[in-house]
Image: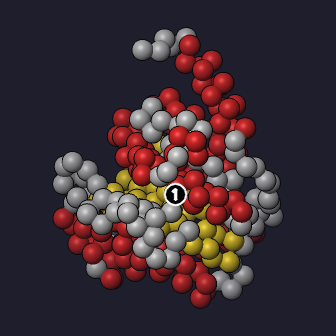
Amino acid sequence: MLSSKKIPVMAVALAMILFSFCTWDSRPLNQVKKVVIDAGHGGKDPGTGGGKEKRYALDIALKLGDKIKKEMKDVEVIYTRNSDVFIPLNERAAIANRNKADLFISIHCNAHTTPNASGTETYIMGLHKTEANLNLAKRENNVILMEDNYQKSYKGFNPNSPLAHIMLANYQSAFMNQSMDFASRVESQFRHQGYKSRGVKQAGFLVIWETTMPSVLIETGYLSNPSDARVLASETGRTRKAEAIYQAFRSYKNDVEQNQ
C-alpha cells in the first residue's frame, strides 16, 4: 500500500512523464469549426449488452453527424469509425489531434450489475469523485488489453491502477471549463427530452486522455435497465438521443463563437 505522503510526489512525477508523451498543439478556443464524433467500441470489442452498445453508439454517432452536416455547413464532421470496426483508444484521440478538432464527442451506452440503475451521464476528464466512476472508467479502459503492444502504446499504463487513472486528468486540465460547459448542455438537453439525467461527472477515460481539445464521453443510457434498453433499441429513441446532443452542440458553438 502506498503511504499518503508519497502519493502526491509520485503523482506529480507520473503526471510529468505522461504529459511529455502528449502531442500538444494549440488552437483557438473561440471557434467550433471541426468536431470529431467517436462511436464507442466496435469490431472485436462489442461493448456492453452483447454487442448492442457498439451498434447503438454507432447509430447515434452517425445520426448526430448527419444532423450537424445538414444544419451547419461551416462545421466539418469527422468520425473515428463509421462502420463496425475496431479502433484502438489512443488512435481515436490521435484522429482528433491530427485533424485539429475543436471538440471531441465519444458516445457510449452504460451497464450496471443492478437493473435499477438508469439515466444518462456525461463525463469529462478529472479526478474520480466516487468509486462507481472509477469502476466505470476501469471497465471502459480495459479494452486496451485487446490491442497489440498496448503496454508500449500507452507507456505502461495499467487500466486497473487507481493512481494511473487519476494522472490522466492532467491532460485535460487546460480544457476543463469548456468540456464542463458542453457536458452540462448535453445533460440539460437530455432532461429536456424527458430522459433521466444523472448529471455531469469526472473520470479518467483513456479515449479522451490524449485529446488536445474540449472532450466529453456520453453514456446515453443503461442497457442493463429495461426502460433505458427499450429506448436505445428503438430508432426513435436513438434519433432523440442524437437530437439532444445536437441541440447541446448548437448552443455551445453559438455561445463560444459569440464570445470571441
What secondary structure is found at the residue carrying circle 1? loop
Residue 228 at least partly seen? no
Question: Within 10 angstroms of label 1, few (less than 14), some, or many (20 or more) residues?
Answer: many
The image shows a total of numbered marks equal to 1
Residue 152, quarter of the rendered image: top right
Quickly name the residue at label 1. Answer: 88
Q: Is residue 226 left or right of residue 209?
A: left
Q: At 25% from the left edge and 63% from the top edge, which residue is drawn?
A: 50
Above-or-below relation of 18 to 62: above
Q: At 54% from the left edge and 84% from the top edge, which residue is drawn?
A: 66
Please state which amino acid type lies under the numbered disc 1.
Pro
Residue 142 or 117: which is nearer the viewer?
Answer: 142
Q: At 60% from the left edge and 25% from the top edge, which residue is drawn?
A: 11
Instruction: Name the quarter where the N terminus is drawn.
Output: top left
Give how far across and how far down residue 51 sits, in percent: 30, 66
Residue 115, quarter of the rendered image: bottom left
Above-or-below relation of 236 to 130: below
Instruction: Name the quarter where the C terminus is drawn.
Output: bottom right
Residue 218 or 39: which is nearer the viewer?
Answer: 39
Residue found farthest to the bottom: 70
Give how far across and how far down residue 148 sits, in percent: 49, 51
Residue 96 or 63: which is nearer the viewer?
Answer: 96
